[in-house]
Image (cartoon, coloured by chain):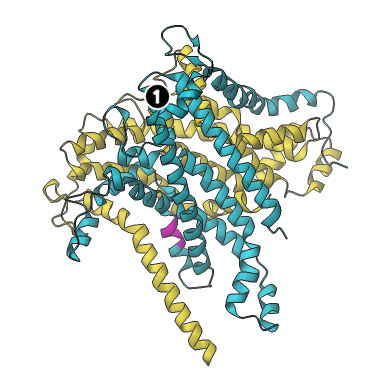
């Protein structure tokens, strides 16, 4: 009896703390949704239910000189290209590191892991100078081209997964005369869909949410990404504008990722666990 | 013997093709860029006039420039609050969630939401929450009879920004710790129970030692993130001419390079940032060897 009472109290404390935390975590989102449906005159009212509610703020996004559809298109195109580039080139390298025996394999892999610890700010300036010299500032290329040169995080993640695929499969395929490329493309890629999906989600999310790189390479409104566009929009609104429209823009910009998250929550969670647990 | 397929004949070529992008990335993107940044850090270059070799001058000004020292102090202060904040809170949330409670998926989803959405978008609403005259936070304080607080003014902006950054990072840490916690075999607890260990004992003798790998990993990731934190700081504290009320080193690098066209000075700052991060990593790995328990 004593233990069940103790458990009851502990459960109560657990739920209270978790609910309190959950309120703090979700209130900003609820507030954003609420504000985006309010009339501009009500933008600072402290109610969570907009009264009256309006969808004009969303309509206005298409009328501003910001050109929201263009921002969306740019973010989508850049994030999509980055995702394709990372999936492809990281998988190619991860396959070599996990399956093929070649000279300097461990040295190369160690070098790659070292790059994970280097702050990206170190590579920012020479990359900028290089792209400036190639006259590519103001284009999307500097944002997505580097994604086609592999990456430490993606390669590491996929290699970890590739290592769990039974070797017998490779040996059997080899006996049947399958080439390296065939083994990579017909065995490893199809069997690694969960890991590939996780990496795709992470990469897309990171690219979609990136601010610093587009700020450097595509700094000029209107032809830029959602993040830079919103940052610019915010600056304008704080000098006297409609917060309701700004919130509508913010809400629309996070909606695609929230949808992906709800559909692929398992991949999200497993991907993070995969990167954190195994060594 | 090292296992691995031996490439046969023409496959050597295909091996090179598969590794090619990564090799180019390593040579050009990673180590080439680092080398270039080091070279740049000894120069004075605005990209318009030809570069001038100035030796250690950029590095000397790292110690004499008051603006930069403020940025460095801010970065260190930020990290000193952010890293323990994220590690401890996310570990705490994970431990609560691991008590096999109902509704774990709902809680997990809610806590993870800020990690999915962009800092830029959520900073828009945090800006409204922190508003001095119109924000909800001050409204709540007011309704309890308190005084309005200027959350984003110079003296308090640091703490406000750290809080939002922690808010945005708890979800990911929580997942890391949950993965570590669920990997602990149940039998350990059963055996300890039989031996008469109480809950507190079990927590400190079983749970904590066995999640040291997660603590290590999360501390590492949080530190790397802390030294590169930019988005929330940019969105919540920026002022005119690329200035900020909480200028951190990354802010200083960006401002020096893209506002003042002082690419050499910015490079020196970037190198120093990298050296600090690498030094911290070395210390962390030293600790890992001694205190982290791997099964």
Kindly identify which chain the residue marked by label 1 belongs to: B
Location of residue A6 with respect to A208 vertically, above or below = below
Residue A231, percent from left and from top: 30, 35
Q: Return the residue nearer the eye: B51 or B218.
A: B51
Location of residue A129 with respect to B6 vertically, above or below = above
Residue holding disc 1: B256
Location of residue B24 with respect to B182 vertically, above or below = above
Q: Return the residue nearer the eye: A225 or B246.
A: B246
Classify residue B77 by image quadrant. Answer: top left
Residue A76 visible in rendering: no
Tell me the colour chain B is drawn in: cyan
Residue A233, percent from left and from top: 25, 35
Residue A132, percent from left and from top: 45, 15
Q: Secondary structure at mark 1?
A: helix
Q: Residue at x 53, y 67 (%)?
A: B95
Viewed as shown, does residue B146 lie left or right of A208? Answer: left
Mark count: 1
Q: Is residue B220 magenta?
A: no
In the image, the segment drawn in magenta is B108-112
Q: Which chain is yellow?
A: A
Residue lying at the far top in this picture: please name it. B50
Classify residue A48 by image quadrant. Answer: bottom left
Viewed as shown, does residue B8 lie left or right of B130? Answer: right
Q: Residue at x 11, y 48 (%)?
A: A41
Viewed as shown, does residue A247 lie left or right of A213? Answer: left
Residue B195 visible in rendering: yes
Q: Residue at x 53, y 72 (%)?
A: B99
Q: Residue at x 48, y 17 (%)?
A: A129
């Amino acid at each position: 009896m004593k233990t069940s009472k103790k458990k009851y109290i502990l459960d109560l404390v657990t739920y209270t703390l978790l609910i309190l935390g959950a309120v703090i975590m979700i209130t900003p989102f609820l507030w954003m949704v609420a504000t985006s449906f309010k009339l501009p005159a009500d933008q600072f009212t402290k109610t969570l239910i907009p009264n009256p509610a309006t969808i004009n703020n969303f309509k206005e996004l298409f009328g501003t000189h910001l050109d929201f559809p263009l921002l969306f298109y740019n973010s989508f195109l850049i994030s999509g290209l980055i995702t394709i580039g990372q999936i492809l080139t990281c998988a190619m390298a991860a396959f070599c590191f996990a399956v093929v025996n070649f000279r300097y394999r461990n040295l190369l892999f160690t070098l790659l892991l070292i790059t994970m610890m280097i702050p990206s700010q170190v590579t920012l300036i020479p990359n900028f100078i290089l792209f400036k010299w190639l006259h590519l500032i103001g284009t999307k290329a500097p944002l997505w081209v580097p994604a086609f040169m592999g990456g430490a995080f993606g390669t590491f993640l996929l290699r970890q997964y590739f290592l769990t695929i039974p070797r017998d499969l490779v040996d059997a395929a080899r006996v049947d005369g399958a080439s390296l490329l065939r083994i990579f493309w017909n065995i490893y890629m199809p069997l690694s869909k969960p890991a590939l999906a996780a990496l795709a989600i992470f990469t897309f999310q990171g690219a979609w949410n990136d601010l610093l790189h587009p700020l450097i390479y595509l700094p000029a409104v209107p032809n830029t990404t959602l993040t830079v566009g919103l940052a610019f929009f915010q600056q304008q609104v704080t000098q006297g504008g409609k917060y309701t429209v700004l919130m509508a823009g913010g809400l629309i910009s996070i909606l695609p990722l929230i949808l992906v998250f709800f559909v692929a929550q398992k991949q999200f969670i497993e991907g993070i666990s995969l990167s954190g647990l195994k060594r | 013997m090292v296992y691995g397929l031996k490439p046969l004949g023409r496959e050597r070529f295909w091996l090179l093709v598969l590794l090619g992008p990564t090799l180019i990335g390593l040579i050009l993107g990673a180590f080439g860029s680092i080398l270039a940044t080091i070279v740049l850090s000894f120069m004075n270059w605005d990209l318009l006039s030809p570069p001038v070799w100035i030796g250690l001058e950029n590095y000397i000004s790292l110690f004499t420039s008051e603006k930069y020292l403020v940025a460095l102090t801010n970065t260190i202060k930020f990290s000193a609050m952010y890293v323990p904040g994220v590690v401890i809170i996310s570990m705490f949330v994970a431990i609560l969630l691991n008590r096999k409670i109902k509704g774990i998926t709902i809680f997990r989803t809610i806590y993870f939401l800020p990690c999915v959405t962009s800092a830029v978008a959520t900073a828009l609403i945090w800006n409204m929450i922190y508003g001095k005259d119109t924000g909800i936070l001050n409204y709540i304080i007011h309704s309890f009879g308190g005084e309005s607080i200027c959350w984003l003014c110079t003296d308090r902006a640091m703490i406000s920004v750290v809080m939002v950054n922690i808010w945005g990072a708890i979800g990911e840490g929580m997942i890391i710790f949950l993965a570590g916690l669920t990997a602990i075999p149940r039998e350990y607890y059963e055996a300890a129970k039989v031996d008469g260990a109480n809950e507190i004992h079990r927590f400190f003798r079983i749970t904590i030692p066995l999640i040291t790998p997660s603590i290590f990993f999360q501390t590492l990731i949080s530190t790397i993130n802390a030294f590169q934190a930019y988005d929330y700081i940019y969105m919540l504290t920026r002022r005119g001419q690329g200035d900020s009320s909480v200028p951190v080193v990354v802010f200083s690098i960006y401002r020096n390079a893209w506002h003042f066209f002082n690419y050499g000075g910015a490079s020196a700052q970037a190198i120093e940032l990298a050296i600090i991060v690498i030094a911290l990593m070395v210390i962390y790995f030293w600790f890992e060897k001694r205190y982290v328990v791997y099964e």
